[in-house]
Every structure is written in C-alpha cells, then in structure tokens.
Amino acid sequence: MIRLTEIKLPLDHEEGEISQAILKKLGISEDQLISFNMFKRGYDARKKTRILLIYTLDVVVENEAELLEKFTDDPHVKVTPDMEYKFVAKAPANQTERPVVIGFGPCGLFAGLVLAQMGFKQLLWNVVKKFANVPKIPLVSGASAR
Ligand SMILES: Cc1cc2nc3c(=O)[nH]c(=O)nc-3n(C[C@H](O)[C@H](O)[C@H](O)COP(=O)(O)OP(=O)(O)OC[C@H]3O[C@@H](n4cnc5c(N)ncnc54)[C@H](O)[C@@H]3O)c2cc1C
C-alpha cells in the first residue's frame, strides 16, 4: 500500500475529487487505482478566504513497485508504514506467576487489558480512600479474586 501525504483540496470539495487528486498525483488511470482509505484529514486555515483540507491517504494500486520507484525522491509518496500493535510477550502455557498491576485508573486498566490480550492472568490491585477519616482499603479484582 502507498501512503500519500499533503493532498490538498478545497474545504467544499466534492467526494469524487479525492480519487481524482490521487490519479493526478500518481499520474495513473482510473482502472489502475484499486482502492484507497483516508488515514488522516487536517485543516489549513491560515488563509481565511481559502481554507484547505489536507489528506493523508493509503492507496492500493496495480503498479505499486513501479510507482514507488518513480516517486523515490518524493517525500509525499511512500510505503504505508506498518502501524499494527505488536505485543511484547506471550503468556506461557503453564503460567505459574501472575503479573501485578498496581492502580485501577485508566493506565492500570489498559495495562490489565494488554496483559490479558497477551494471555496473562493478572492481578489488578487498587487502594480506595472513600472518606477522609477512613483508612485506605486495598481492593483486589479480576482473575485474582478466584
Ligand atoms: C479533578 C480532575 C478532573 C479531570 N478531568 C479530566 C477530563 O475531563 N478528561 C481527561 O481526559 N482527564 C481528566 N483528568 C485527568 C485524568 O483523571 C488522569 O489523567 C487519569 O486518571 C490518569 O490515569 P492513571 O491511571 O495514570 O492514574 P489514576 O486515575 O490516578 O489511577 C491510579 C489508581 O491507583 C490507585 N493507587 C494509588 N496508589 C496505590 C497503591 N500504593 N496501591 C494500590 N493502588 C494505588 C489509586 O487509588 C487510583 O485508583 C482529571 C483529573 C482530575 C484530578
């Protein structure tokens, strides 16, 4: 897949103008463009009378290798980067020890989710202070409760 950046179109452009801009940028015909996906859309509002939409587009074409060669010096035509999240570990089949996540805020919940996606049974540990004069109560939840 090819990533095109800095594709500029007027604020009120028609939907079909995006594919036309791709064809123009790459110098290809309509039948060579298989599909495209909008990765990002930004705004350039520096000129109030001429506000522009700035697109980053991922494009599937028939002649990808040929086009990448042709645009080798163009920083706005590159291979789409692999942005898929790669898990750093995989839980062993016979997990004997559980990782402990301290804190049940957004960061702790996310850490627990990622650990679970990697196959780990984990402990989520939190302290809750309900009232000013009551001591902090430790809470243990998730897989640890069993
Ligand atoms: C008044 C206020 C308003 C906010 N409004 C917004 C908003 O509108 N939008 C937004 O995006 N962000 C907002 N935030 C910021 C947001 O709440 C924090 O960025 C977010 O909660 C941080 O997440 P965290 O997981 O890092 O920490 P926390 O949410 O603080 O979670 C940490 C957890 O760890 C527990 N803990 C601490 N020490 C221990 C220990 N020793 N043992 C066990 N458990 C422990 C705590 O009880 C807590 O539950 C606001 C923050 C405040 C204070």
Image (spheres, rainbow, N blue to C red):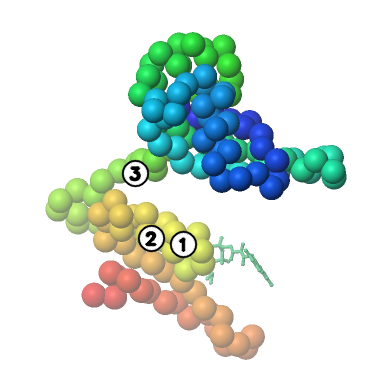
The mark nearer the N terminus, 3 or 2, is: 3
Classify the position of ligand 1 by quadrant: top left, top right, bottom left or bottom right: bottom right
Classify the position of the C terminus by image quarter.
Answer: bottom left
Disc 3 designates what residue? 87
Q: In this view, does 36 lie above or below 26?
A: below
The mark nearer the N terminus, 3 or 1, is: 3
- In space, the residues marked 3 and 1 are separated at their CA atoms by 17 Å
Q: Does mark 2's beta carbon lie closer than 8 Å to ligand 1?
A: no
Q: Is residue 119 above or below residue 10?
A: below
* Whether residue 80 is visible: no
- In space, the residues marked 2 and 1 are separated at their CA atoms by 6 Å
Closer to the camera in the image, 96 or 77: 77
Disc 2 designates what residue? 112
Position of residue 131 measured from the top left corner of the image (x, y, whole percent): 60, 87
**Contact (CB < 8 A) between labels 2 and 1?**
yes
Closer to the camera in the image, 133 or 103: 103
SS assignment at label 3: loop
Three-letter residue code for mark 1: Gly
SS assignment at label 2: helix
